[in-house]
Image: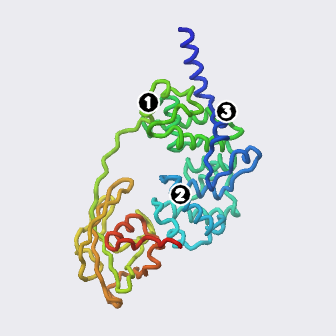
């Protein structure tokens, strides 16, 4: 009995003091990422470029590492510094962001770059409090930049870290109510000498070992202190509150195609869902109401024919669009029938337009392959 009590006590102690074995694992098995400074360099005092850390963290919100890599490399090629991004054309930034989703991030990205360049001389604030004064930077992003870019002892908690901590301590409180407890547990374990590496080690552990399904507990460097592993309940965590069923909204999209292959586009209003992005004309749907699903909402009279329908899932609702196509002569429609903010995009320029995924789907339903960039070589 005494032996069992001692083993439980040892496990509890290791669950609150796991930074050393975790960092030792990270030193050997860290992921190589284009925005990351390797741990052997950070231990020597080399810190990442705050601009690259900030850019990667904004891109990684609600997006996978695999999807972000090529966007990150394209952004840093085009705008290698925060000052360069600050002076970029907003339309160019939105075009480069197209496909990453959550487009308010791109708008705030540009505003933040402008603020850092104009008010801070191109240097990011080096504290959580200072970072949170910048556009688009909330609690998580501020903590991540402070820890990773400036080696500040900030408790960083993303989805991967939530999973690791809730399993380590078998936290039964469902998310999001469990977030304060998770953050407190991270703060308790935080090593003040390597907070940035600790944050990235936790992220890597959740992404590669402590995965949502079939976690590789036998390879985990902190398995000895993990309550869920000991009890065989790892896949139960994190506990999540029941999801509300998403409503489905309906609408119509109209793809007008000229003889030369150009497609009629327009820009969405600067605020709201998909604000500032490019779209084909369509009916007025929102997250709260349906739009017309027939040709009554067409931008001008034409021989509109239905070419199918598409479905796209947003954060809070799903959208189903009936897609219509009209083939026009190059001088159509008459100027007085053109949408006021519309323009014709040629087949060469269409793939590079700031089209969100839902609009790419609509165009593809009418013109298969139209939004795909041609392969080089």
Residue 316 at x, y percent in the picture: 36, 53
Q: Is residue 29 depicted above or below 264 in this figure?
A: above
Residue at 28% in and 59% down: 249
Going from N to C along the chain, the mark reached first, 1 or 3, is: 3
Residue 357 at x, y percent in the picture: 41, 64
Mark 1 lies on residue: 172
| Outermost residue, front side | 377
| Outermost residue, top side | 1
Residue 141 at x, y percent in the picture: 57, 50
Between label 2 and label 1, give the one nearer the viewer.
2
Going from N to C along the chain, the mark reached first, 2 or 3, is: 3
**Which corner quadrant of the image does residue 266 belong to?**
bottom left
Q: Nearer the viewer, residue 282 or 14?
A: 14
Mark 3 lies on residue: 20
For the residue labelled by badge 3, is the local secondary structure a helix, a strand or a loop? helix
Q: Dot 3 surroundings within 10 Å: few (below 14), some, or many (20 or more)?
A: some
Q: Dot 1 surroundings within 10 Å: few (below 14), some, or many (20 or more)?
A: some
Residue 333 at x, y percent in the picture: 32, 87
For the residue labelled by badge 1, is the local secondary structure a helix, a strand or a loop? loop
Q: Is residue 16 depicted above or below 98 in this figure?
A: above
Question: Gap between marks 2 and 1, in whole Å?
Answer: 32 Å
Mark 2 lies on residue: 68
Q: Is residue 326 depicted above or below 201 in this figure?
A: below
Q: Is residue 164 depicted above or below 231 in this figure?
A: below
For the residue labelled by badge 2, is the local secondary structure a helix, a strand or a loop? helix
């Amino acid at each position: 009995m005494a032996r069992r009590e001692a083993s439980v006590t040892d496990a509890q102690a290791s669950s609150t003091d796991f930074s050393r074995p975790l960092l030792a694992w990270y030193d050997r098995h860290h992921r190589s990422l284009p925005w990351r400074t390797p741990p052997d360099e950070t231990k020597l005092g080399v810190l990442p470029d705050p601009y690259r850390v900030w850019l990667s963290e904004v891109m990684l919100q609600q997006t996978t590492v695999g999807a972000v890599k090529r966007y990150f490399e394209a952004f840093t090629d085009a705008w290698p510094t925060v000052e360069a991004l600050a002076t970029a054309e907003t339309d160019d930034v939105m075009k480069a962001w197209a496909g990453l989703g959550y487009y308010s991030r791109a708008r705030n990205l540009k505003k933040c770059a402008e603020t850092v360049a104009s008010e801070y001389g191109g240097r990011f604030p080096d504290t959580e409090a200072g970072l949170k004064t910048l556009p688009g930077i909330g609690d998580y992003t501020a903590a991540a930049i402070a820890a990773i870019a400036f080696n500040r002892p900030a408790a960083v908690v993303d989805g991967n870290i939530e999973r690791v901590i809730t399993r380590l301590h078998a936290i039964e409180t469902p998310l999001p109510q469990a977030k304060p407890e998770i953050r407190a547990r991270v703060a308790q374990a935080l090593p003040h000498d390597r907070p940035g590496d600790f944050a990235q080690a936790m992220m890597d552990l959740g992404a590669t070992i402590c995965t949502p399904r079939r976690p590789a507990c036998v390879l985990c460097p902190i398995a000895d202190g993990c309550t869920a592993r000991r009890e065989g309940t790892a896949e139960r965590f994190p506990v999540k509150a029941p999801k509300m069923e998403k409503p489905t909204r309906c609408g119509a999209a109209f793809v007008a195609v000229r003889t030369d292959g150009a497609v009629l586009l327009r820009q969405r209003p600067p605020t709201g869902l998909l604000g500032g992005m490019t779209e084909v004309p369509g009916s007025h749907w929102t997250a709260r109401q349906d739009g017309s699903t027939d040709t009554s909402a067409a931008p001008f009279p034409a021989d509109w024919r239905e070419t199918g329908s598409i479905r796209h899932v947003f954060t809070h609702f799903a959208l189903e669009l009936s897609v219509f196509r009209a083939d026009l002569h190059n001088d159509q429609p008459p100027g007085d029938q053109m949408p006021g903010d519309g323009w014709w995009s040629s087949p060469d320029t269409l793939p590079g337009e700031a089209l969100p995924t839902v609009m790419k789907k609509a165009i593809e339903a009418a013109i298969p392959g139209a939004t795909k960039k041609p392969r080089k070589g």
